[in-house]
Image (cartoon, helix red, strand yellow):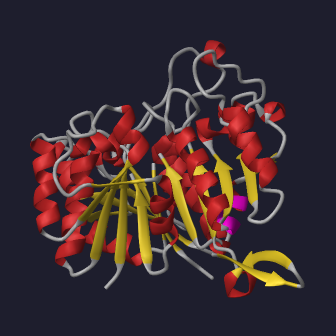
Amino acid sequence: MKITHEWHGSKVTKMANNGYNKTLTIVSINGPYRDEAAYTLIRLAHAAKEKGINVNFFNYLDGTLIGHRDQAPKEFPVVEQLFGTVLKKGLKNPKVDAIACIKCTDARGVTKQQTEGVVIGGLYDLGEWTAESDKTILLG
Amino acid sequence: MTNLLLVLSKDPYTTEIPNLVLDIGLNAKAKGNNVSLYLVEDGVTAARKSEFGNKLQDAKKKGIKILADDKAVQSRGLDGNLVDWVQVKEIGTLLDHIVEDNTRVAWF
Amino acid sequence: MSKKVNIIVTQPPYGKEDAFSAIPLAETQAAAGNSPSITFVSGGVHSVVKGQKTSYGDAAVWQKDVPSVEASITKARDSVKFYVLEADLKKRGVSDSEIIEGISKLNIDDLTNRILESEVTLVF
C-alpha cells in the first residue's frame, strides 16, 4: 500500500509497512492469442503496479511464447509489446521479473527469441520463487 | 476458518471443471470457511441465466460470494444477462483477493 | 519456509503436455525445499493407468518416443506424493487394478481439504 506525505516541501510516496511489498508469482502455460490468459496476466500486472505489488512471471510450456520477439498480430493488441512494457516499468519498484523455462524454450526453438527483459531460467527458479512469494498461481 | 478464493476461467458444458470447482466451493463452505468464486475469461458464462447459473444462485444462497471480471462480462455481451447477486468488478478487486492474507487461491 | 504445493492436473496425458510437465515442476519444488503433491482429476485421471506404451512408429523416422507419463510418475514417487480423484476414475470406468502403484485415491472432501491446507495450489 502506498502512502503520500509532505517532506521538506515535496510530496513523497513510499510503501507502508516499512517498504514491504507483497510478491505474486504467476505461472503461465498457454501461448498468446489462442488463449486469453496472456491478456489477463498483463491486466493483473497493471493492477499490481498501481497497488505496489511485485510480480514474478514464470513462463512454462506454451507460456514461453508470451515473450516471443517480433509479434505482429494484425487485429489483436500486441502481447509482446504490452508484456515488454510491464517488464520495463518493473525495473523500478514495485518490481516485475520474468523467467522463461529453458527446457520449454529450447523445445519450441524460442530460447534466443525472447523479448528484452525475459531471463532464461529453469524450474528450480520457480521453486525458489514459490518459497519466497506471498502467493503463487498458475493460469491454466 | 480459512478464506478460499476459487477463480474459474472455464465455460461450463465445454468442460466439467466448473462443476468440480462448485463442488469444492460448496464443500469448503459447509466446513465453515469463507468462499468466493471469481469468474474470469470464459468462466463468466457460468453466471449466465441458465441451468448452471441456477447452481450458482443456489451456491450464493449457501453463502458463497460470486464475483465476475467486468471486461470478460462486457466482451461476451453478458451485461444484463447474469444471474442475480453476481458482483461485477474490475481487475484490481481480483488482485486484492489473490494477495489477501489468510486466503488460499486455486485458479482453475 | 517449506510450503505445501498442491498441483492439480485436469487434462488427460498425451493429448496435452500438462500431465507430463507437471511432474518435473513438482520434483523441483521438492528440490527447492517445498512439499509437492500432484492430484489427477477430471480427464487427468487417465494419467494413472498402467501399461502406457508411447510410440508413433518407426524409430528411424521418429528418432525418439514421446516420454511416458507412467514412467515419470514412477520415477518421481520418492519426492512427490501422487493422488487421484476417485469419483473421476469411476466415471471413466478405470478400475483399481489398472492404477499405477503408489497412487492414493481421494474423495471431494479430501481434495477440498488439500486445497485449504496447502499454501499453494497450481492447476494445470
Q: Is residue A139 magenta?
A: no
Q: Where does the image place residue A106, in percent across and percent down from the top left? A: 75, 34
Quadrant of the image containing the N terminus of chain C: bottom right
Toward the viewer: A84 or B23? A84
Q: Where does the image place residue C123, in percent across and percent down from the top left? A: 44, 53
Q: Where does the image place residue A38, in percent across and percent down from the top left? A: 57, 39
Judge from the rendering whether residue C70 lies leftward or rightward of residue A23; answer left or right: left
Q: How many marks?
A: 0
- Residue drawn at (41%, 37%), measured in percent from left and top? C52
- Residue drawn at (21%, 36%), measured in percent from left and top? B13
> Which span of residues is magenta-colored?
A125-129
Any part of residue C92 in sight: yes
Any part of residue B40 in sight: no
Q: Where does the image place residue B100, in percent across and percent down from the top left? A: 48, 74
Label the magenta part by its dominant secondary structure: helix
Based on the displayed image, in which of its 4 quarters is residue B14 positioned? top left
Based on the displayed image, in which of its 4 quarters is residue C25 positioned? bottom right
Toward the viewer: A52 or A12? A12
Q: Is residue A128 magenta?
A: yes
Residue A140 drawn above or below residue B6: above
- Residue drawn at (70%, 19%), measured in percent from left and top? A72
- Residue drawn at (21%, 44%), measured in percent from left and top? B82
- Which residue is the extreme one toward the front? A9
Toward the viewer: A70 or B20? A70
